[in-house]
Amino acid sequence: MLTKIKTASLRGVDGYPVTVETDVHRGLPGFQIVGLADTTIKEAFSRIRPAILNSGYQFPREKVTVNLSPAGKPKEGSHFDLPIALGILMLGMENGMQLQDTAFFGELSLDGKINPIRGALPLALCARKSGAKHIVLPLANCEEAAVLGDVDLIPVSDLMQAVRCLENPQERSPYIRKKLADRKPDGLDFSQVIGQEAVKRALLIAAAGNHGILLIGGPGCGKTMMAGRVPSILPQLTYEEQLELTGIYSVAGMLPEEDPVIRERPFRSPHHSISAAGLIGGGQKPRPGELSLAHRGVLFLDELGEFESRAIDAMRQPVEDGFIRLNRNMEEIRFPSQVMIVAAANPCKCGHLWDEKQSCTCSAAQISSHLRKLTGPFSDRIDMHVRVPQVSERELLQRPLQRGLTSEQMRKQVIAARRIQEKRYQGLSCRENGRLDETGIARYCTLEKEAEVLLQQAYGKLGLTMRAYRKLCKIARTIADLKEKEEIGVEEAAEALQFRVIEKEQGSYGR
């Protein structure tokens, strides 16, 4: 006798459909799972048999064979416990063929209780795509998966409740999503920043075009404070982006219990001692790294010069491509990494190179070594490089109403510029100027004659790379969008140029 139950398995942050085929036939009692199952699934027998017996059901005294189809793809995860157990219990049920539109997920305890699982949302998304209209899953995961809205979620707390869903499908009670209170804002606002209007302007441009930005300045000048306020000027996440981010955090096991849906753009700030695997993800069972956890948001790299060179170099390709490619078990796994890089660094080891009040204690060799880290291949991929001065005594006396634009005012400008870009790039893979490739730059970054001459002169005199020149064009395109201009003029080109000169004129770092 054979039963079939729909479920799914994870591959990175995406799922693919799996059918659990269970067969019982005469022979010595035994239990075998085939179909490239990982250790967690192969240990399922030790959980499933006690769970079935402790729930008051009989476990077959015959040979049980479970096949996870398609057999040629690796499977992993404890969420296979429930479909395997139900496949065994369905043997002999007359209504077993009524489950073509239902998928099952859940991890079993020895007493028959059903525990929450990782990756519930991407698994549910996969089941919906494969035709499932009803999804049976642990109660603790229902709020997370309820963001889908167009499938019936059947919450179950134990094996007996799941069996009743099989025996009496008409008595299933779909999950009703909780009504959550609106989240209070975190209170971070650019109006709280004293002075630094030029830097705030640079951050506005970076947010409007999704450009990476490197802030270089001494200790205490406000680099970290301003970086933490960048999410407050970014647009709200769309529904699709919420689904995408919630799936990533679900796979990583980092969803908050009180509201397991990511509604705000992430801000990740890893310590400079982090490894390359911690940044880009990986492991024997690949999990998302900081780059993927910051997807659609901000990755803040504080003290950029202190990060290991190997870890920083590992980010070069993912930052440009927008995804991370890993190879495991002869399969390619992709993690998304479309992030806005915000990095901060001191101009030298002690941090006082530019300070007029304190003397720098670094030797010329130390300064040169530090500069090489800040002007290396990774920082060359960061669009904007901005010098952050210390706040002057005059700026300290500013009243709150004199401190420039608020985050809400800056955010309105960012949204307006991004709407222009969204309309311009409709039908293309990129949505912001910061993600334009060479073809897009040539087509959409149209320079007026004077602006073209200015950038060509800068390219020759400053010794810029071709990559840096292209980034200048993209930054100028964003500045023109903020002004709602179709073509890039000399003013936009000149403003863009000041965000790339600092990296090439190492003399500007001098004493």
Image (tube, rainbow, N blue to C red):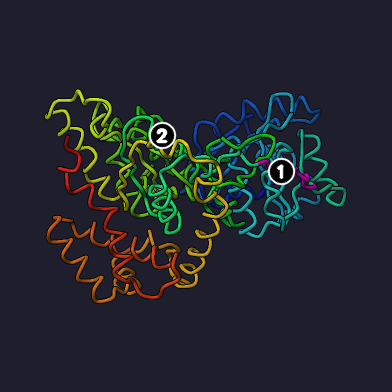
x and y percentages locating residue 341 in the rendered image? 39, 46
Q: Residue at x 54, y 49 (%)?
A: 407
Foreground residue among 478 and 392: 392
Disc 1 marks a residue whose amino acid type is: Glu
Q: Name the residue under label 1.
A: 143
Q: Which class describes the residues within 10 Å of circle 2: few (<14), some (14-19), or many (20+)?
A: few
Stretch of the chain drawn in magenta: 176-184
Q: Which residue is depicted at the point 17% across and 61% down? A: 459
Q: Tag count in the figure?
A: 2
The crowd level at tag 1 (other Cα within 10 Å; few <14, some 14-19, many 20+) is: many
Tell me, yes or no, if residue 334 can be seen here. Answer: no
Element marked by disc 2: loop
For the stretch drawn in magenta, what is the main secondary structure?
loop
Whole-number angstrom distance, CA of label 1 to CA of label 2: 29 Å
In the image: residue 421, left or right of residue 134 = left
Q: Mark 2 points at which residue?
A: 284
* Residue 268 picture location, percent across and down: 47, 38
Could you tell me the amino acid type at mark 2?
Gln
Sequence-wise, the earlier of marks 1 and 2 is 1
Q: Residue 59 carries which label?
A: none
Q: Where is residue 156 in the image (x, y as percent from the top left)?
A: 77, 39
Q: What residue is at 38 percent from the left and 49 percent from the top? A: 198
Instruction: Indicate the quadrant where residue 184 lies.
Output: top right
Residue sitting nearer the eye, 87 or 419: 419
